Image (cartoon, rainbow, N blue to C red):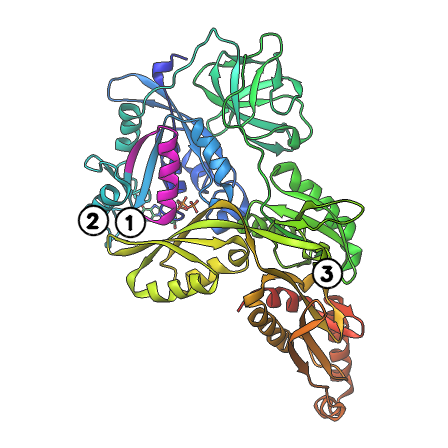
Amino acid sequence: TDLSKIRNFSIIAHIDHGKSTLADRLIQRTGGLTDREMSSQVLDNMDIEKERGITIKAQTVRLEWTAADGETYTLNLMDTPGHVDFAYEVSRSLAACEGALLVVDAAQGVEAQTLANVYQSIEHDHEIVPVINKIDLPSAEPDKVKAEIEDIIGLAADDAVLASAKSGIGIDEVLQAVVDRIPPPKGDRDAPLKAMLVDSWYDPYLGVVILIRVIDGSIRKGQMVKFMAGGTQHLVDRVGAFRPKIENLPELGPGEIGFITAQIKDISQTRVGDTITDVKRPAPAPLAGFKEVQPVVFCGLFPVDAADFEKLRDSIHKLRLNDASFSFEMETSAALGFGFRCGFLGLLHLEIIQERLTREYDLDLITTAPSVVYKIHLSKSKEEGAKTIELHNPADMPDPNRIDTIEEPWIEATIYVPDEYLGAILKLCQDRRGIQKDLTYVGGRAQLRYELPLNEVVFDFYDRLKSISRGYASFDYHQIGHREGDLVKMSILVNAEPVDALSMIVHRASAETRGRGMCERLKDLIPRHLFKIPIQAAIGGKVIARETIAALRKDVTAKCYGGDISRKKKLLEKQKEGKKRMREYGSVQIPQEAFIAALRMG
Ligand code: GTP
C-alpha cells in the first residue's frame, strides 16, 4: 500500500466519554459490518469489558474510507486500554500510531485520565484531533469544553469536531479530519524488516495472534522471523488484518498495522514492545523503549473449597494464555491450604482476573489482602552478610530483628475534583500519608497533585475517592520509585490463632487504627460460637487492638427453633451448606464473606 494513503490513529478518552461507541460508528460508517453485526459493541469483545464498559486489550480495525478528494484511504483504528493499570500497553499502542482522536464528553469536560493519555500521546509526537462527543445531550457545553481543552491541555480546539457517537452526528467529519490532519506513516520498504509487537492474545482457532506495526521492510507468510528481546525464532504462517472480521493478506508493508500467527503456543514468548525482524536479514538494532512489564500488586488466591484447587490451577493457566502480564506461583497457607500467589499490574487488573475466575470458571475464591512490592534491607548475618530482598507476601516477612530498613513504592497521583468535595479529598489524601505537591484551579475544578505510598492506595483509595465525591472526582497515577518507610507487619489473631491471610504490612503510625478497624469488622462478621472468641491485632508479640465476640447462649437457639422438627431439619441442612463456605481456624469458623468484607477498609 502507498504510504501516503495510510493513516494510523488511536482514540484516547476518559472512561465513559464514548470511545467504544465512536469506534463502532466509524466501523459502521466505513462498511466493515452490517447493522446486525453492529448490534453489540465490537471492539470490547470480552464479556467483562462489555459489562464494565472498559477496554482491556488493545484491538485494531482496518477501515477503508473514500475521502473528499475521491481517494480511498486505509485507516487503522487502534483501540487502547484506558486505565492506568495498563499504561504500558497504552504507551506501546500509541507508539504504533501517528495521531489520536481525543474524545471529550461535551457534558463532563476534561478529566484526569484524559490528561494522562494526552500527555502520553504528545510524548509520541502525535497529531491530536479533539472530538467533542455527546453534543446531543441537553447538558452539553461544547464551547466550555473547547475552552477547557485549550486552558488545561494547551491544545488548539477551534477546529475540534463536534460529534454524537450515539446519534451518528459528525462521523464523516471525524473520518475526514483523520485523513486531513493525521500525517501518513513513514517507513522504508527496502530496509530489513522491523516490526513492533503491539499486542498478543490466545485464540482457540488461530493459536497466539500477534498484532504488529511494521516500521521498515515487509512481513509475509513463510518468512522466518526473530523476536529480538525474546530471542525466539518463528515461521510466519498467516498474515492479515481485522476489518473487523479476519482477512488474510499476502504481506504487511511499512506503515501497516495487522496481525501474524506463527505457531506459537505460549503467550509468554510474545512480549509487548518487542521488535520482530527477519532471521536472514536482521535489523541492526531493535526499536527503542522496550520494557518488561512488572506486576506491582500481589495477593493470594485460594479456593474456598480445598477440593477446587485443581480447577483453580487449570483456570489460572487458561487465563494466563491470554494475559502475559499476570503472574502466579503456588502458595501454601497454614489456614487456607493450597492456592496461588498472583501478581497484577494494578488493582483493576486484580479485580478483572478475580472476577473472570469467579464468573467464567465458576470458582469460589478467597483473596488475601493485596500487597505491594517492598524492598527489605537485611542487616548483616554471619552466613549471608547484608542483603536486600523483594517482599510480595506479608507472610514471608523476615524476623524484624534482622531488618535494617524497609522501602515501599510511591506514586504521584493527579486528582480532579469539584470544589465542594475538595476538603474531604484533601483529608483522605492526608490520612493516607499523602504529600501535597500542587493545588490549582482549572475550569471550576481543583487539580491536585499528591505523592502517596502505593500501599495506602491499593486497598480502597479509589472507591473512597469516588464515594466521597459522589463519583465526580477522577484519578490517575504513575509510580515514582521506592522510599524508606516505618513499616511493620500486623497479624490478626482469632481465638489466639494467627490468620495468615489477614496479616498485612502497614505504616506504624496507622497500625493501631487499621488493627482496631479490622478487629471491629471481624467482630461483626464472624458468627457467634458457643464460646467467647477474642480477636486481636498484633505487631510482633504486642497486641495493639482487641475485640471479643460474646458466646452464644444455648437457650436462645433452643427458643428460636421451637418444637417444629421439619423447620429445624431445614435449618440444619442450611447450616451444612453454609459450612462449605466456611474456613476453620482452630475451633472457630470464619465465613468466606468475612474475609472479603474484612479486607475492605472502612
Ligand atoms: P471505556 O471503554 O470504559 O473507556 O468507555 P468508552 O469511553 O468506550 O465509553 P462508551 O463508548 O462505552 O460510552 C459510555 C456511555 O456513553 C455509554 O452508555 C454510551 O451509550 C454513551 N455515549 C457514547 N457516546 C454518546 C453520545 O454521543 N451521546 C450520548 N448521549 N451518549 C453517548
Sequence-wise first label, 3 or 1: 1
Tell which of 426 and 383 is nearer to you.
383
How far apart are labels 3 and 2 at the CA level?
52 Å
Amino acid type at image mark 3? Val
* Disc on res. 304: 3
Amino acid type at image mark 2? Lys
Which region of the structure is painted magenta? 109-130
Badge 2 is on which residue? 144
Q: At which x and y percent is residue 301?
A: 69, 54
Q: Residue at x 34, y 64 (%)?
A: 421
Q: Secondary structure at mark 3?
A: loop
Please state if 401 lies on the left or on the right of 257 as rendered: right
Please state if 86 lies on the left or on the right of 143 as rendered: right
* Disc on res. 535: none
Amino acid type at image mark 1? Gly
Badge 1 is on which residue? 109
Is disc 2 in contact with disc 1, using a CB cutoff of under 8 Å? yes
